[in-house]
Image: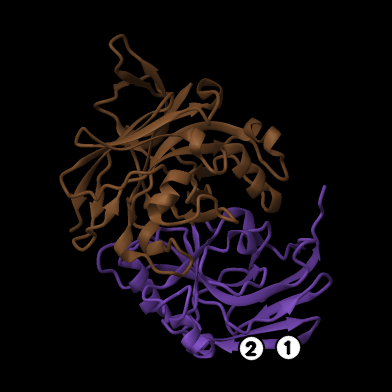
Amino acid sequence: MIAGTVYGVVLNDAVERERLGEALAAAPYGAPPVAPVVYIKPRNCVSVGGAAVPTPGDAPRLTLAATLGLLFERDLVGDDPASAAIGGACLALDVFEPHDSYYRPAIRQRCRDGFLPVGGLATRPADPALEIVTLFDGQEVHRWSLSRLVRPVDQLIADLSAFMTFRAGDLLLVGVAGDAPQAQVGTQVTVRAAGLPSLATRLVAEVSA
Amino acid sequence: MKRARIVHQGRETWAKVVEEAGGEALLLTPDGARIGAGEARWLAPVTPGATIFALGLNYADHNKELGFAAKQTTPLIFLKGASTLTGHLGATPRAADANQMHPECELVAVIGRPARRVSAAQALDHVGGYTIANDYAVREYLENYYRPNARVKNRDACTPLGPWIVDAAEVGDPQALALSTHVDGKRVQQGSTADMVMSVADLIAYLSEFMTLLPGDMILTGTPHGLHFVAPGETVTCEIERVGRLVNPVVAAP
């Protein structure tokens, strides 16, 4: 289903931005971000169908950031409204090693094999305050609402489209909650949101063969 | 062998590149057509979905020029989306306020065999071929978040790549290649891949230690010193010994 590039953005959570406050004006940043802060999840990250997340031996605690993925059904053309090009939506679990700095691209932390389980596709939910719930071993550990996004989806797509074109088959992860939970090997993870197929996976030890 | 990706008879196709007497390249398509280099409609020779890695600060002399330490403690690696690529002779748009937009000639290693936890000594066995990228940067848009940030390095059509992929065996040692950039015939970059901080083999070993590299993935290995800010109307030629010449015009963005 994902035929193109998977893009995500950090620092799009108003709660995290509030918490970081003055730190974003200090070194090494110097000023709060102006453009959306983009990362890419390469193809080795993507898994579908509930495959387990391999947990590297050198990164025993992983952040599991549940988010909404939007799938582009066609290239954005001209002044197309962004919403017209979105063909579907899914839950996604952006997995990464916790890292404190946003200064350099976090390739080693974010791009390991299996670090992006995605759920089944459905029509994009209409609710701009969609609540995404994460459960570990059946217990709710995190809940956030897309009303926390600094740039709501349409504005995010518009701001990114000022310099890059989303193409058919690209997936956009709309943001990462700054307080996303952490887990280790053995944890069963479920992500739920109204109107979308649930996503279920578990953390297993990476095989080092 | 050299392989190019072109548009031919309404389809994207790979073509074999041969040299005619006289030095002009000739493209042979699977349906038997023979297309002169001047008539070809070039695409970036990229497998759809491939991961595109790029290196910052991987030539000691360029790092000095930018005010950074010669060797970074962690290699500065970033990723690029497919929409940033364009083929040989494709135009690169320069935004009206991008007064500090500069070309960066880079050797590109194309992965041929999957690589996971390979040593530097074995790494080059996993390279299928090499091509050339011009990894433009726009310094005005630099921000200190996941730097170099997407507005600098993930702009539509601001990474010309090609013209073709040359088999690794024909290139030989990837750390012994002269590379240069000329703008309207004037040399603005000149260096050697011998001066890379991390070699192609080092980079494959480093990346494959924590992730799987897949066939078709590309690693843009960084650029040597030489800063020239381009203007619309200029033609930029990136050349790498034993690989080829990648030519692109700079145009004013609409």
**Residue A140, numbered label:** 1
The one of B156 and A77 positioned closer to us in this rendering: B156
Q: Could you say which chain is coloured brown in the image? A: B
Residue under the image location 34 percent in, 63 percent down? A76
Q: What residue type is labelled 2?
A: Arg
For residue A127, say whether it is visible. no
Regarding mark 2 in the picture, which secondary structure is present there? strand
Alpha carbon separation for disc pair 1 and 2: 8 Å
The one of B222 and B155 positioned closer to us in this rendering: B222
Regarding mark 1 in the picture, which secondary structure is present there? strand
A140 to the left or right of B148 = right
**Residue A3, numbered label:** none
Q: What residue type is labelled 1?
A: Glu
Q: Is residue B154 above or below residue B130?
A: below
Coordinates of residue A84 in the picture (x, y in percent):
36, 71
Residue under the image location 61 percent in, 83 percent down? A193
**Residue A143, numbered label:** 2
Chain identity of mark 2:
A
Graded by Cα atoms within 10 Å as few (under 14), some (14 to 19) or many (20 or more), the crowding at tag 1 reads few
Coordinates of residue A120 in the picture (x, y in percent):
61, 68
Q: Could you say which chain is coloured purple in the image? A: A
Residues at badges 1 and 2 in contact (C-beta under 8 Å)? yes
